Amino acid sequence: MGLGEGVMHRIALYVILLISSVGLAAAHPLAGSWRLQPELGTHLAAWNALDLIIEVDGDHVTLTRKFAAGRRTFEDVTKVDLSNPANMIPVEMWPDARYIGANIGGDKTKTVSGQWIGDGNVLRLNTDVVLATQQGEHPVNTLGTYTVSTNGERLTLIEVRSTRTQPLVFVFKRLQSDEARHTGNAE
Amino acid sequence: MKKIFSLVLLIALAASVTAQPAPKRLETPPAEATIIPMSENWRMDGDIPTNVLILSLQGLANRDYPRVYLEYPTHWQWETVRPLIKFMEARHGMKFNRLGLNDADAALGLFGQYAKGYVVWDREVRASVNVAFTAAGVLDAVVVSEDLIPLVEKHGKKKVEDLRNIFRGKTDAEIYQWAVDKYWDKCSRDYYAVLGGHAGMEMQPGVADFAIMQRAFCADLSANPKHPAELALLKKLLGQQNPASTVVGWHSYGKDTEGQHTTLTGNFGLKMEGLHNLPNVSFTCQIPLSPDFKFANNHNVARDEKLTAENKVYIAALATDSMGIGTWTKPGRGDIPYGWQVLMGWLRLNPVALQFFYEDKLPNDYFVGGLSGPGYMYPKSIPADKFPPLMKDARELMAALDLRVMEIMDYSEGNRHVGNTDLPKELVDRYYKEFPDVIGFINGYGAARTFDLRDGVPFLSYDYYLAVDRPEADAAADIEELIQLNPKRPYFLLMHVRESNTIEKVKNILGSLSEEAEVVPLDVFLKLAASNKTYQTRFQEPEDPIDHNP
């Protein structure tokens, strides 16, 4: 007559688990488009606006930063495999502090590792980069922690840079899919 | 006698250093002149009609003698309008009569004789104002909107040009081509006026008086490749101007970028003199320097003096963007050593303003020359064959103005956000060759990366850009981070202060540093930087990013 009741239960359970894992991946609290709320955190300087798009697929996390200052824009993409202890990522420009004399140096890459913290909703990225200054090259480490509010609407990024005595706090709001980007337009 | 000889020499120098003739300067200042206070409202749907009428009348009335001085609202970008009145009263013995606010009727009563007629612009077409300014200069006419025709006719003026209804539906390129066809042959080849800046309903054509006085062609043609017809026409016009002549005004905020427009003027070897709202140049260009006045900078070290840097952090702060639009009159000036970039072309266009700044300076104020040459220019955009004569002009202006430091800025391949603002070695070589007497060069606007030291003369770039909206605590943390990133001592941190930051703010930032640092005058800073080269020689490299300011 076909499969037994126990086997049916097991298959049903696997299907449920499979669907659940897919659903969880798509609905990871960090995933989505986020817009910086400049008034709530550290002054961004140089740029007037920043959108952050986060994609999560298990241990594969992709962060796209879209900076804008009037009609001037810059975009960089950081793809991190959290199971890889050292993701080497090319860096075209170091946009984080364009107002100081520090530019991407070394081999123009950054080395990124990361991990999920706690229940898996908090992301921590550890980034090493070499910056070129007027006196030469200088290694810099940045520890970034991405935390989403319990209602899923606010993302807080706290960055601690080895060369800076003050932490940088960036607060983002979740963008709805129909919310138009306003960054990158003429001043 | 010696003073008179010096003055004559200075005036002769001003007239001779370039192929371009300097505006005629009086031998003695006028005994009296008239002030017309201007409205707060500069909107097309507001007081612009009356404002442009008064501006055009000013240009005509001042053409052969300084008669009319406009008192712009207190929010005007060039903040020295009022202090200059007091200065001319006190130092030049001038007396000013005052009309009522925007009183065009009274102004026409007093100065209408200098206008042969009127030009009507079309309130539906913004560009028609610029065409009307061009026509006004050529035809010696005032500029009116339809509703002001009765007023000028009351003063006996006849219509000499009517721009109503002929431009509607046409592009700006078509409109300005019409103006070229009709007026270009009669316009100045020494001055071209970019009456851009504010776009949309706001318009601030403060330099139009000078444009009319000089019969300059007025337009806001775009240097943006997105507007090919306008760009083609603009190139054609600039290419017909006299070598090393001047472009007054400012690019249109609604069409192109500062980088695009200044790059283009540089391509033709022309000097840019901002701004679009620079006031009263038709008046101030004619006011002579006081016979007992001499341009004297606050030098803190002798030209050939050698200093030795200690193992510490040295900081020098400098405000650019011209002194008139900065914080010269705001609290804090004089409290700390501070550098100010002098727009050297003002020796010809605005000498009395320079005399005001030089005489008003405090011991901590130090002047440097700029920007990149005899006007606002991007050196990478200047054809190599046009570079030496321009820099000769700059050299002579620096000598006349007692300046020993040349500031360079180049936004032709980037800006403080993207691309680069650095110079290739070959161009740095040319600067060292053209300016053998300077004590140093400074480069950038935002932070830049060109550094060198040759024969005791450093070439340094800004390491920090203080934005107007940067909070003091964040700025202090930025500077402390730079000190961390540059651990060798001495460390030379050159700081560009965006013009609207007050010196009080800069003082607070520097006073709150947790790291020890000494704030020194710029000339001392350069001499110290010459003594111990902890910075690495660097020029623009082929792989540096390039962005043409889209």
Image: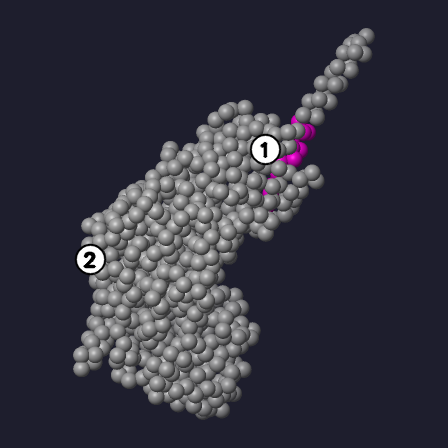
Could you say which disc has been placed on residue B304 in the image? 2
Numbered disc 1: secondary structure: strand
Numbered disc 2: secondary structure: loop
Residue at the spot of label 1: A123
Q: CA distance from mark 2 to mark 1?
A: 58 Å
User: What residue is rendered at 39% in x and 37% in y?
Assistant: A138
Residue A142, image x, y percentages: 49, 36
Q: Is residue B460 above or below residue A150?
A: below
Quadrant containing the N terminus of chain B in the rendered view:
bottom left
Letter of the chain that mark 1 sits on in the rendering: A
Q: Is residue B300 above or below residue A19?
A: below
Q: How is the image coloured?
A: one colour
Residue lying farthest top?
A1
User: What residue is rendered at 77% in x and 14% in y?
Assistant: A8
User: What residue is rendered at 53% in x and 43% in y?
Assistant: A168
Q: Which one is in front, B128 or B510?
A: B510
User: Are dots 2 and 1 in contact, CB under 8 Å?
Assistant: no
Report if residue A159 lies within the magenta region.
no
Range covered by the magenta-colored residues: A22-35
Residue A92, image x, y percentages: 42, 39
Residue B185, image x, y percentages: 31, 73
Q: Is residue B248 above or below residue B266?
A: below
Location of residue B157 (image quadrant): bottom left
Q: Is residue B450 above or below residue B152?
A: above
**What's the residue type where badge 2 is placed?**
Asp
Report if residue A30 lies within the magenta region.
yes
